[in-house]
Image (spheres, grey):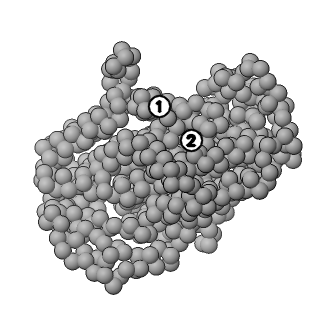
Amino acid sequence: MYHQNYNPLGSVLLSTIVAAIPIAVLLYFIALHPHRDKDGGRHLGISAPYAAFFGVIAAFFVSCLAFGMPVKSAVSAFAFGGLSGFLGIIWIVLGAMFLYTMTVITGKFEIVKESIVHISFDRRLQVLLIAFSFGAIIEGTSGFGTPVAIAGAVMVGLGFSPFQSAVLNLLANTAPVAWGAIGTPIVTLAAVSGIDQLTLSSMAGRQLPWASFLVPFWLVATFVKMEGGTWKEVFEVWPAALVSGLSFAIMQFFASGWAPTHLMTDVVAGVFSVLATALFLRFVWHPKTRFLLKSERGKPGAEARAAEQSWKFPYTFGQTAFAWVPWAILIGACALWGVPTFKGVLNNLFSGVKIDTTLFGGKFGGTLSLPWWDMPALNGMVQRMPPVAPVNAKPEAARFLINWLSAAGTGVFVAALLSGLVLGLSAAQWREAIGRTLARMKIPVLVIGQVLGLGFLTRYAGTDAVLGLAFTSAGALYPFFAAYLGWLGVFLTGSDTASNALFGSLQRITAQQLHLNEVLIVATNSTGGVMGKMIDAQSIMVACAACYDDPKERKHALGPIFRTVWWHSVAGAAVIGIIAMLQAYVFPGVIPLLK
């Protein structure tokens, strides 16, 4: 049994610094390490697989040498993270990219692009419609980086640069994350904290709408400044940004607190925002001037094309509707796979076929439809200690549940296969779609697997808890830093769900010790965590895979993207922290009662 020690070096400060070494190493090699490529070009940050590898090596040294974790347990924890990352994240993104590639090969994606451009030729408004509203719908159905991949690919197809598309979609994929993948983060947070789902969802729905209201303005300002525009050009589209953000925020508030919709909050709010914004632009208001990309300005006919009216749309309604069918299938499949009763049916589909054996020393059992593997030297062999866990807490479980039928990624793959059949792909097109998807995703798969392994290793070694405990010394300011604890968890694990599993219990224990409202503090772990989503290596690698066609550009994109979104992420977490402080001490009446 490995008992976690949160001060192995006898000095809280020194132990905290050592616990942070793997993160510091990863950050340094992603964003700061200077090097030259084969062509002599100078870059900051090395390629993502090597950066992740050095972070993993540092994590093993810290976990095994400084914290005394057995090597076998450390290896098992790393493998557990990699396997969980494949089934929980990579499987989803592979399916989404497969579907997207099929629409490109068949030419249907061109019609989808035209239909979006048809709503508005103004590039600022396209950012709102695609990155914010459409991305929120995809986040609500599948989560785990899928909206960054799909919406990013759409924007590149519309002519935005890969770098712009990646950065803007990472910024947009914040406020919806707490209810991603049919509310999985909220479900997980309720399970580990002991607070019911609806109460936590309602609390999150009284914090994140303020961010949802701000994000459209934030997106437009970031985009316009990236294109060398002025603040006047930012504020020219304030009515559209207001409608986009306000419609999303209002529906997010109501949907999050109503039992029938609280796990579908993102989908409901995203659909409402898309419809409200599109109808507003179509029938009520449109900017007097069109904002174009730098690459379009001055080109013969660019302004004329941007001013074209609706009757110039080159496709029929039937052609447009058919082009959108794959995306409708994707949303429908993800929604179906998120229904608990349907998951139960899939998990019991082959329940009559039992499995009972061992694999590398760990018990491998379950059924054919829901096998599981108790990770060797890890399951039940790690004990979290107070104050991170309650006294006499059970040892940490480490069972890899292989829900290969009910996993969200399976729903995405089913949607992709159905879409291919509906689109009538030929055998050659099927081969091309598979080949292009695998070629595009091989590097992201390697990076995501390593980073998820690193996150699980820090969790089972206890180094994450050491960093978390550093925040608990904030006293009355803890509501502010509770947001940063969730933010740290998402950065470490790449998932708001995983961050909630990591720190949900610690947040409630700390709230009890400091006599703070438990509902507020626990929910803030999830709402603060959403702002860490834009800087986790997995999300950035998904963005690179979706937005960059050139493998060489993709290789060096992670560092610049990370450096660009870093301060946005820090500022976003601060906004949530300020909201939490105000709700703790100024407006406590907005906090729902603990049931």
Q: Which amino acid does label 1 sit on?
A: Asp
Q: Which residue is drawn at 53% across and 72% down?
A: 339
Mark earlier in primary sequence (2, 1): 2
Instruction: Determine crowd level at label 2: few under 14, some 14-19, many 20+ residues with C-alpha closer than 10 A.
Output: many
The image shows a total of numbered marks equal to 2
Examine the rendered structure and indicate whether residue 386 appears above or below residue 303: below
Residue 144 appears left or right of 176: left
Q: Nearer the viewer, mark 2 or mark 1?
A: 1
Residue annotated with mark 2 = 152
Q: Position of residue 245 (x, y in %)?
A: 69, 47
Q: Where is residue 430 in the image (x, y as percent from the top left)?
A: 50, 53
Quadrant location of residue 372?
Answer: bottom left
Examine the rendered structure and indicate whether residue 474 appears above or below residue 420: above
Q: Tell me, for residue 550, which label it has, or none.
A: 1
If the image is split into quadrants, where does the N terminus sit?
bottom left
In this view of the protein, can residue 416 be seen by the observer?
yes
Instruction: Determine crowd level at label 1: few under 14, some 14-19, many 20+ residues with C-alpha closer than 10 A.
Output: few
* Residue nearer the viewer, 284 or 426: 426
Give the residue at the far bottom of this rendering: 352
Q: Is mark 2 on a helix, strand or loop?
A: helix
Q: Residue at x 41, y 76 (%)?
A: 347
Q: Position of residue 521 (x, y in %)?
A: 46, 56
Q: What residue type is labelled 2?
A: Gly
Q: Where is residue 509 in the image (x, y as percent from the top left)?
A: 36, 61
